[in-house]
Image (cartoon, rainbow, N blue to C red):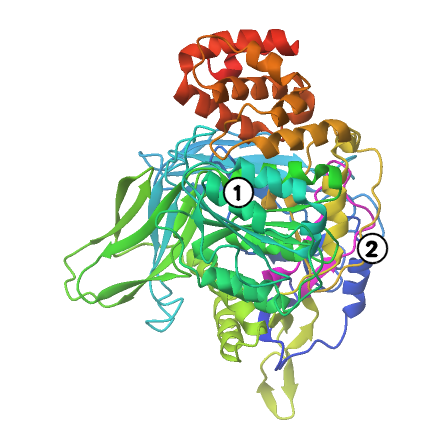
Amino acid sequence: MTARSEDAKVHAVLQDEVQQPHEATGGWENLEYLRDQSEYPGEAFACFLGTLSPGREVVVTLRYVQELPREPDGAARFVLSPTLNPYGTLYVWNCRTSKLHYSLLLTASLQSPRGVVDVQANFALTPLIYTAQDHSTAQAPLLQVSLAGSPQCHHDLELLVYYGDPTAVSAVVEKGDPEAPPGSLLGDPMVLVTLAPSIPEAVPGQRQSGEFIFLLNTTFLEHAQDSLLFLLKSLPLGCYFNIYCYEETSVGIYSQSVEYTQDNLTEAMRRIPSTGSSLGDSNLLETLRSVYNTPRPHRHPRQLFIFMAGLPPDVEAIAAEVCRHRNSHRCFSFCFSEDSAALAMALAKETGGEAAYVSSDNRRSFVVLKCLKQALKPAAEGVSLSWTLPRGLEVEVLGGTPQSIFQGQHNLLYAQIHGQAQDTTVAKGVMTLQYSLDGQDVTYTIEFPLCPQGDGRLAGHRLAARCLMKRLLPESVSGSGEEPRHRAVEISLTSGIICPFTSYVGVRTPQRVTWYQRPLALLPPRQSLIPCQIVELRGSRISSCYPKSIWVPPGWLTAVRASWLALRQLTHDIAALPQRRACSKACKPPPPLFSSLKYVDPMEFGLCSSTLWQWCPEAAAKCQELVALQNADGSWALSSGLASVLEVDEDEIKGKMPDEVMEPSIWATVMAVTWLHRHDEYYQDLCELLEAKAVTWLCSQAVSQLDKCLETANTLLGSSVKPSVFRL
């Protein structure tokens, strides 16, 4: 940040918080005023520049860099921060007039090797002007609009950029800083690698690869046996699984994950204790280390389902352990109390999974199963990158390469080119991506220039610095020595990207020249220091347009209690959402915030517990009985237990079995699926995966017999299930 007026120039610099060679002496009351009086909560960069005389002006320049989140359709989403979008009286608290008129001119310069196809926004747009024939670059003044007055409901300015191929692999090279030493983070060229291969949808209920590991705590064992039953029964054939009860032992039910079969499932259900014991000599950290030390099955992507009731000990060490193995798995985290909410969200975000706060016993199974549906998305497995470069050059992938890429994921990697090419006639390098998809090997080959261009802003290098610091922060607080912290501070000060161990300070330099006559000399301007820092705004109210306030710690170094309230509000009562959108009522103020918290959009976490679901205890008990009888392959056996659930006499079921049916389990499975659809309002979300597995089994056994079976089952159960349910 720099600010320039006729009298002075102010620029923000970073410093090590431990050493703190510079400290501002005055003006802190302005930042305290900003923190207390802000209307909306969140994180803001604040610097007190002083007063502005009538008729004078000040020019403020802000520069920041960020990875843009991706929409489901592949569009990159840019949101203009409210701090940069003047609204209301945010900037006129100290002015004598309450009405100042603002106008905003936004210009976007877009560049992509895949080409820029379209741009959409929630405001008026002007046509794009392509500056390259291949449409790889585009520019347009997007809007010029008056922002006077306080709008009735605050809206961010959002921009969606669509590229030529949203599911693709690309490599863009950015040249280094010529003033930085060769071999340093900013000195060598940086390759920005996008991994978003096209992965087709999986057919529900079919065989599927994957390793699913469930880490259960005492509370879950005591109160959520039904959720565990639905989870295990919903797993697909072809996968591997294991279960850890981490408050009893750090060892799994099996020494390592086993294939999902009927025998293994039955044995697992037998070994799971019905109630948990008091906390023993094991904890979540030890269990995670045990999991990571266990080899995973070949070409089966690993996914962890972690259940937490309270805040586990060694939070920093848990964060560091998960971060260390982030490229080898995904975490789906579930919290049952306020203490563990922030940690659950952080573990899921770091590994590309999802988190959920389970606010009600009635919704627990639904929440868990919705996350399982996300986990069952197909993935590219065995991902590897190789490089072909002239002799003398080598590539370092900062942060490593993920072993799996799941459908819909966009992975941005940073690879730095080190060394000096011995053959300067070679102008291009080659990156090769290889992975396995459904047992087939897939290869992408991408060429990139070895003499890249750049605008000098080093955006890619700074993003790479941010990525490196994100990896170092958990290590620096988990007892791994001083080296991670020193490295994080070094990267922060070099790149200009703030971290928890550095802070801003504003340096003010007068622009006017001062002459001194004794002795006659022109002295250098005398610098002064002013407050300049990241401020956590408390907010007098939360925007009522939509729920968007959740606080989590930067770098998720510690779990904090403040996050759970907003999380619970978001997931507890989705029925009130239409009323929130009316933008007419003020929300309850959030809990007091800590200076270490970071304001983020909860939609980044893909929270999965915000859908209405009708709950009937009697129906749920019947459904649980039926699910307990289902086999691992999706079928049901014709038994007295099944007849009891269906509330039909067993002899009548056997007597009504069509003559064409040679196998009683086919008739029993058709009856079970038909019964589930008869009570669709209760079981649709709970039994979607179970039903898909059952229908897949039926189609593989006797497609020609299903029409007659369904007709008879509808008559016997008094239902009207359509043939499309059985893919007929």
Which of 223/34 is in front? 223
The image's mark for residue 727 is: none
The residue under the point 30% across, 39% down is 439
Q: Which residues are magenta?
A: 533-556
Vertical placement of 423 versus 640: above or below?
below
- Indicate the quadrant containing the N terminus: top left, top right, bottom left or bottom right: bottom right
Q: Quadrant of residue 146?
A: top right
Q: Which residue is mark 2?
A: 37
- Which element is circle 2 on? helix
Q: Quadrant of residue 368?
A: top right
x, y percent for residue 213: 51, 51
Q: Which residue is mark 1?
A: 266
Disc 2 vs disc 1: which is toward the camera?
1
The residue under the point 52% across, 47% down is 267
Magenta segment includes 714: no
251 horizontally vs 30: left or right: left
Which of 607/330 is in front? 330
x, y percent for residue 476: 55, 73
Q: CA distance from mark 2 to mark 1?
A: 60 Å
Which of 625/426 is in front? 625
Magenta segment includes 539: yes
